[in-house]
Image: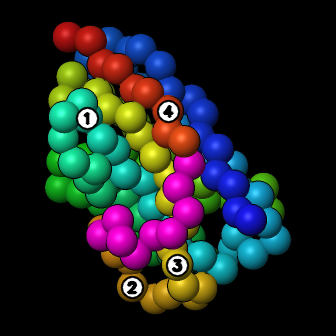
Amino acid sequence: QVQLVESGGGLVQAGGSLRLSCAASGRTFSSYVMGWFRQAPGKERKFVAAISWSGGVTSYADSVKGRFTISRDNPKNTVYLQMNSLKPEDTAVYYCARDKITLREVLSSQPGVYDYWGQGTQVTVSS
């Protein structure tokens, strides 16, 4: 059974930064695309960023491009989301997720492509 545990959320002022971490259990972490999603109260879960299994390819939602950076450390079974220049509209619960299929070459923004999800970490950006 795969477990994903997010950490690093919190309260920050607009313009500030946070770094989220997602620690994964299991020995095959390096074979899967990993993604970050977020969900604001009363809204649907939305794609934020994804990273290929090798770490060489990344994809971002337009709303975070240039401000957020996704990365991974395969020996540590961890994926990160560095968030800079935070805005109040970035306030949400942030989730990491693992792709269903190993060694997928295409990064997807669709939640249905991901099968394991963390419990989420709250990010609140005050104005």
**Viewer-nearest residue: 11 or 55:** 11
- How far is mark 3 from mark 2, CA to CA? 12 Å
Tell me if mark 4 has few (under 14), some (14-19) or many (20+) residues whose alpha carbon lies within 10 angstroms of its own. many
Q: Which residue is mark 3?
A: 100
- How far is mark 4 from mark 1, CA to CA? 12 Å
- Label 1 with label 3: CB-CB less than 8 Å: no
Q: Is residue 107 above or below residue 103?
A: above
Tell me if mark 1 has few (under 14), some (14-19) or many (20+) residues whose alpha carbon lies within 10 angstroms of its own. some
Q: Classify residue 1 by image quadrant.
A: bottom right
Task: Check disc 2 and report its element: helix, strand or loop.
Answer: loop
Instruction: Give the residue drawn at x 39%, y 85%.
Output: 106
Q: Amino acid at mark 2?
A: Val
- Name the N-terminal-most of marks 4 and 3: 3
- Name the N-terminal-most of marks 1 and 2: 1
Q: Which mark is residue 106?
A: 2
Viewer-nearest of discs 3 and 2: 3
Instruction: Give the residue drawn at x 18%, y 29%.
Output: 89
- Name the N-terminal-most of marks 1 and 3: 1
Q: Position of residue 120 (x, y in %)?
A: 49, 39
- Name the N-terminal-most of marks 4 and 1: 1
Boundaries of the magenta span: 110-118
Q: Colour scheme in the image?
A: rainbow
Instruction: Give the residue drawn at x 26%, y 12%.
Output: 126
Quadrant position of the C terminus in the picture: top left
